[in-house]
Image (spheres, helix red, strand yellow):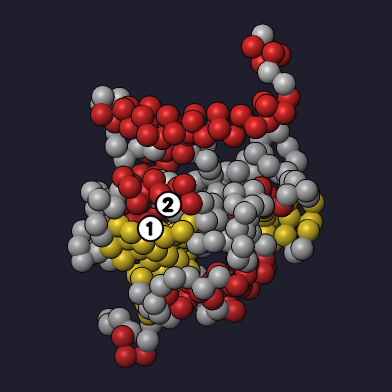
Amino acid sequence: MLRKLIPAPVRRFLKPIYQSGQSFLRNQLIEPSEVWLGRRDPLMPPRSKLYIGGGDFKAIGEEFRRYFIDLCDLQPTQSVLDVGCGVGRIAVPLTEYLKPPGFYEGFDLVPDAIAWCSRYITPRFPNFQFKQVDIRNGFYHPAGKGQAAQLQFPYADEQFDLVVLVGVFTHMSTVEVDHYLGEIKRVLRPGGRVFTSFFLLDATSKSLMGKPTSAFNFQYKLDGRYTFDPTDPNRGTAHDTAEIQALFSKHNFSLPQPIHYGDWSGRQPSLSFLDIIVGQKPFAPDTLPNTP
């Protein structure tokens, strides 16, 4: 009733002020009070910050921590780079595993996600650091100015033992995947590993993805990738398995394990929801591991 009494131009003027006030109350009063009152773990982001992915935040993070240990042989004193770290779904469970001199670095294009991680995770675990990169993404960061296909990761050469990308290549073009693999190889130490996840298309997944048991139907081909939404392919992207394997080979990554297929298409048996590929950077000639 009150809304009808306020002229439209005034409502348009007041709307951003009202929204800003709501945001201030939520960020500065309501959400911190949940932690103060013991209603929420301080390392559990509030609902307003969970902008990507579904499911149980803690359980999914712990699931991937197991993969890093079991599939990538991650050790507590090693270093991890989390590409597309979001609000710490991967970082939080790793705080219980990585110990100095082990360390973690994460970067993401969503400023609010990095701000939350830097405020709540880094003060408790100084060996966990976060950076924001200004990359444009029509779905997650439309105001960004940079291009993913030109991004130089903000880290030195050969700095990390493990690079992880969970649900990142599922939003990127083949050209961008190609560029990122080059950057990953640069920042990995010799013998280091990369953990990646995809929606991969082969004969099996193509035959399944149009059925009710499939979560997505990547039926539109666009710029060398496949999407379920041709108006915004960054919402979800699938790639041909052979093309992705060729990109790993192009950047001289070995694939020490078979692909661990996920059940996103209804495929069984499966390991997780997404398809997982683990690559390994070659050892330097003078650092090859001893063999019997």
Q: Is residue 258 above or below residue 152?
A: above
Give the percent coordinates (x, y) of residue 272.
Answer: 50, 46
Q: Dot 1 lies on which element?
A: strand
Look at the numbered discs 2 and 1 and tell me whether their residues touch, using CB distance below 8 Å.
yes
Separation (CA) of disc 2 from disc 1: 6 Å
Q: Is residue 188 above or below residue 105?
A: below
Q: How many marks?
A: 2
Residue position for label 1: 130
**Number of the label disc, if any, that sits on residue 230:** none
Q: Is residue 154 above or below residue 8?
A: below
Which residue occupies 70% across, 33% down?
A: 212
Let me know if residue 25 appears in the view: yes
Which residue occupies 47% across, 76% down?
A: 185
- Quarter that holds the N terminus: top right
Residue position for label 2: 114
Q: Amino acid at mark 2?
A: Ile
Q: Is residue 68 above or below residue 273?
A: below
